[in-house]
Structures are given as C-alpha cells and as structure tokens.
Amino acid sequence: SILGIIFATTNIINEIKPENLIQSVENLPDNLWVFLGIQLLYIVGGWIFVPFAVTTVAAIVVFPLWKAILATTLGLFLGSTVSYWIGRQGLPLTENPRFKKHLGKVESEIDRLGAWAIGAMRFSPQPPFVATSVLAGVLRVDFWRYILATFLGLTPQAILIYIFGRQALEVLKNPSTV
C-alpha cells in the first residue's frame, strides 16, 4: 500500500528511468551521509527489491574505487547480517507443523553442505539476496560460516560490477556508443 501511495502521489516513474537515476546518483556528494545512506540501502534495499548490483554501481559512481569497495563490502555484510538475524529469530514459518516436519532434514543437509550451499546461492544471481539470508537464519546456519560463504560467493559478482560498472553506466547514458 505504501508503494501505491508513492506511485499515486509522485512522478516516480520518471524518476526511476535509468538516465534520471544516473544523473541523480552522479550529483551525490562524496561524504559520510551518502556513505551511510548507501549502507542503509544495502540493509533495506533487498526488502524492497532493489538489487544489490544497483547499490554497488551507485557506490562506484559516487566514491573513488577504494571507498566504493569499502562501502560495498560493509553494506553487503550489514545487509546480509540483518536479514540473517531476522531469519534467525524464527519467522512464523518455523512454527508451522508441516514445515517443522521437514526442517530437520533440510537442516542436516545444510549442515553437511553448509558454506558451500550458501556460497553457491550467493554466486548465482537467481535467488534473491534477502531470501538467501533469511533462509540461512531460519535454518540456523553457523553465522561465521554463513558470512564467509556470503563473502566468497558475492566477491566474484562484486569484482565484475567494479570492473564493468562504469562502462555499463556510460552505455546507459549514451546507448548510441554501442
């Protein structure tokens, strides 16, 4: 309902066009408030369906490379950790008798595959970032193994975004150069 109100009361469709988004991001200053805002977007963004790649590209546009890497690494850690702990609190799903019946089997497989399963899910662009984090929390994956797997699984994607982010922005800004 909140998104409905936003769409009804604003001109958000024009604001989310790539060229407008790029211009808005390019005009952001390189300061602490923007850095913290990007951290907040990593934490909240997945819950409102903002792909982490979009936030990472924004960090690349605003900050020098070293600060973009720091912002991205910290943001992914914070976003993953918050979603993991939400799942760890035992969403109502874990109280459902039909779910509980199968939970032991799933937990034993996760224990057996552990970090490899989480890393594979992180490496693949398909499972939503938040869903993977919450699922890991619900299934009680060891936190430090989860963080390590998240870092290892997301690093290749992040590196590619770092390498190709600016070039992709140039294409979005000026498609005739393709």
Image (cartoon, rainbow, N blue to C red):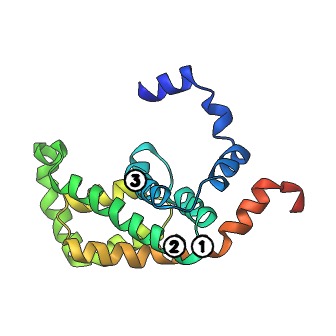
Indicate the secondary structure of the residue bearing disc 1: loop
Indicate the secondary structure of the residue bearing disc 2: helix
Q: Residues within 10 Å of mark 2 (few under 14, many from 20)?
A: some
Q: Is residue 149 above or below residue 139?
A: below
The front one of 65 and 136 is 65
> What is the residue that sits farthest to the right in this orientation?
176
Q: Position of residue 7 (x, y in %)?
A: 55, 26
Q: Position of residue 44 (x, y in %)?
A: 38, 49
Indicate the secondary structure of the residue bearing disc 3: helix
Which three-letter amino acid code belongs to the residue tagged 2? Lys
| Circles 1 and 2 in contact, beta carbons < 8 Å | yes
Residue carrying label 3:
40
Residue carrying label 1:
64
Q: Residue at x 25, y 77 (%)?
A: 145
Name the side, left or right, on which 34 lies relative to 173: left
Q: Is residue 49 above or below residue 169?
A: above
The span from disc 1 to disc 2 (Cα, nearest Å) is 6 Å
Residue 67 has which mark? 2
Q: Residues within 10 Å of mark 1 (few under 14, many from 20)?
A: few
Q: Position of residue 167 (x, y in %)?
A: 74, 68
Name the side, left or right, on which 28 lies relative to 142: right
Mark 1 or 3 closer to N-term?
Answer: 3
Q: Residue at x 13, y 42 (%)?
A: 96
